[in-house]
Amino acid sequence: PNSGSVSKGIALSKGILLTWRKTNFTEKYEVEISRAANFGSAVLKEKVANNFYILKHSAEGSYWWRVRSVAQSSLSSWSQTNQFQIAP
């Protein structure tokens, strides 16, 4: 995903669905979720095969997330930062 990719988060009964546009020649995507907008301490950093991720069982509060594509040993730049909230 490049900085122009549209990314969104959708609340589901079993978690938060994070989605982004597929990119050509991508083998995996790296998703990073943090409680801080500067990603100083990541809650999660995981590689996934598809253009979505479901975050389950997280504590209440604000979260920021971003994604980038992985192809062989190359990484794209991070997508724009997105935010979501988990309410009680």
Image (cartoon, helix red, strand yellow):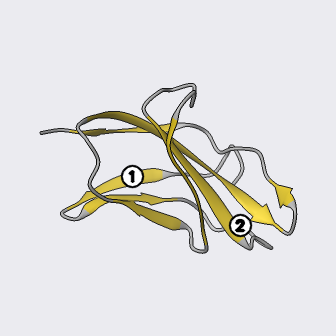
Q: Element at badge 1?
A: strand
Judging by the rendered image, the residue that carries numbered circle 1 is 9
Q: Is residue 10 left or right of residue 60?
A: right
Seen in the image, is 7 located left or right of residue 67?
Answer: left
Q: Quadrant of residue 62?
A: top left
Residue 74 appears left or right of 32:
right
The residue type indicated by label 1 comes to: Gly
Residue at the outermost right position: 73
The picture places residue 58, in percent across and down from the top left corner, at 29, 48
Q: Residue at x 42, y 32 (%)?
A: 35
**In the rendered view, does 46 fall on the left or right side of 24?**
left
In percent of width and height, residue 75 lies at 80, 54
- Which residue is denoted by mark 2 in the rendering? 23
- What is the quadrant of the N terminus in the image? bottom right
**Label 1, residues with CA under 10 Å away: few <14, some 14-19, many ≥20:** some
Q: Are marks 2 and 1 in contact (CB under 8 Å)?
A: no
Q: Nearer the viewer, residue 60 or 2?
A: 60
Can you tell which mark lies on residue 20?
A: none
N-terminal-most mark, 2 or 1:
1
Taking the spot 65% from the left edge, 45% from the top edge, the residue there is: 79
Quadrant showing the C terminus: top left
Query: Looking at the picture, how far across and down is residue 41, in whole percent?
Result: 53, 31
Q: Is residue 12 above or below residue 39?
A: below
How many numbered dots are placed on residues in this image? 2
Q: Label 2 sits on what residue type?
A: Thr
Mark 2–mark 1 Cα distance, whole angstroms, equals 18 Å
Dot 2: few (<14), some (14–19), or many (≥20) neighbours within 10 Å? some
Classify 81 as above or below 18. above
Task: Give residue 86's quadrant in the image.
Answer: top left
Q: Say which residue appears at 18% left-offset and 63% top-offset.
A: 13
Find numbered disc 2 in the image and state the secondary structure of the residue it sits on.
loop
